[in-house]
Image (spheres, grey):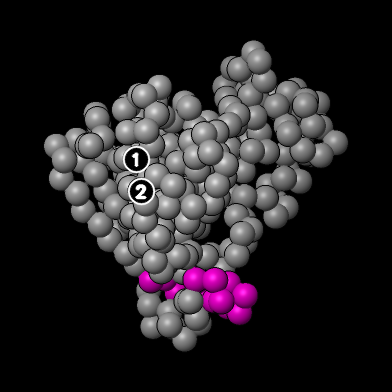
């Protein structure tokens, strides 16, 4: 089976220094790009995170501080990576909740104005969890009859994710071989930022999902409590969340 594509799609996976989207860094990224005409290309980069890699993370993915000491930083690689993905939809395993938010943070730190406008994302884990409730290794075994060799290698996990998605389309006739349809199927909730701190209510208006203003409309809080905006901008929130909040504030000002 081949994916039915209207534009390229990039399957990707990250290995990192941890799971904190705002603070942790990428140590390896693998991208497998599939084009509408069936052509494919792949690239894997080791990345110097510029911060120490905790031993417990090295134990999982096998990437040590010594291994990446002479590798380029993400800032040095950002333009190459962005060039590969800028025209593409994105897909991954648990990518909506982790890989895409962390990639966005790294891009913004590197000065690349990354966002998801004009693209969609498919989280293969969500399809799997809605259908079978398993891990990546079990998914590959279940759908493809294969053992996941070299698990927690970004390249191995990326290729496994691609193979699983093709097998899912074969297995479930109700899944449409269409990236926008799959993106809608794998969307857990409508959020404005990757971290899920700003979501949309039933009327399509942005609301806070955390703190003392949880459930309150963002534009209303920005109007009645302007200091809250400054607090978020100066606190340890994800850069993309700050970017979205700034856009809402500017939109509010421009409509006055």
Label 1–label 2 contact, CB within 8 A: yes
Image quarter (top left, top right, bottom left or bottom right) of the C terminus: top right
Residue ranking furthest to the bottom: 66
Near mark 1 (Cα within 10 A), the count class, few <14, some 14-19 or many ≥20, is: some
Residue ranking furthest to the top: 203
For the residues marked 1 and 2, what is the alpha-carbon distance in whole angstroms?
7 Å
The residue labelled by disc 2 is: 144
Q: On the image, which quarter does residue 81 sit in?
A: bottom left
Query: Which span is picked out in magenta?
Result: 46-61
Q: On the image, which quarter does residue 217 sit in?
A: top right
- Whole-percent x and y of residue 157? 41, 58
Q: Is residue 181 left or right of residue 132?
A: left
Among numbered discs 1 and 2, the one appearing first in the sequence: 2
Q: Residue at x 21, y 53 (%)?
A: 41
| Total marks placed | 2
Residue 78 can be seen, yes or no: no
Residue 127 against residue 40 in the figure, above or below: above
User: Which residue is more in the foreground, 23 or 18?
Assistant: 18
The disc label shown at residue 78, or none: none
Residue 174 can be seen, yes or no: yes
Q: Is residue 48 magenta?
A: yes
Residue ranking furthest to the right: 212
User: Which residue is more in the foreground, 235 or 212?
Assistant: 212
Q: Is residue 161 magenta?
A: no
- Whole-percent x and y of residue 196? 64, 38
- Whole-percent x and y of residue 231? 76, 46
């Amino acid at each position: 089976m081949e994916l039915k594509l209207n534009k390229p799609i990039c399957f990707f996976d990250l290995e990192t220094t941890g799971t904190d989207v705002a603070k942790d860094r990428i140590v390896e990224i693998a991208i497998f790009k599939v084009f509408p005409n069936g052509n494919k290309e792949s690239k894997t980069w080791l990345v110097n995170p510029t911060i120490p890699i905790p031993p417990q993370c090295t134990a999982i993915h096998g990437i040590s501080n010594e291994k990446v000491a002479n590798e380029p930083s993400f800032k040095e690689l950002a333009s190459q990576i962005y060039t590969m993905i800028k025209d593409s939809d994105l897909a991954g395993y648990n990518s909506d909740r982790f890989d895409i938010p962390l990639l966005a943070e790294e891009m913004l730190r590197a000065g690349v104005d990354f966002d998801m406008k004009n693209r969609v994302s498919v989280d293969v884990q969500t399809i799997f969890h809605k259908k079978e409730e398993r891990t990546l290794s079990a998914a590959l075994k279940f759908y493809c009859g294969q053992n996941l060799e070299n698990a927690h290698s970004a390249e191995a996990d990326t290729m496994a994710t691609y193979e699983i998605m093709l097998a899912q389309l074969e297995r479930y006739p109700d899944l449409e071989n269409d990236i926008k349809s799959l993106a809608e199927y794998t969307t857990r909730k409508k959020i404005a930022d990757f971290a899920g701190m700003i979501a949309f209510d039933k009327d399509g208006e942005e609301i806070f999902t955390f703190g003392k203003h949880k459930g309150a409309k963002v534009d209303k809080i920005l109007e009645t409590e302007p200091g809250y905006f400054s607090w978020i901008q100066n606190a340890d929130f994800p850069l993309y969340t700050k970017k979205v909040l700034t856009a809402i504030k500017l939109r509010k000002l421009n409509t006055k």
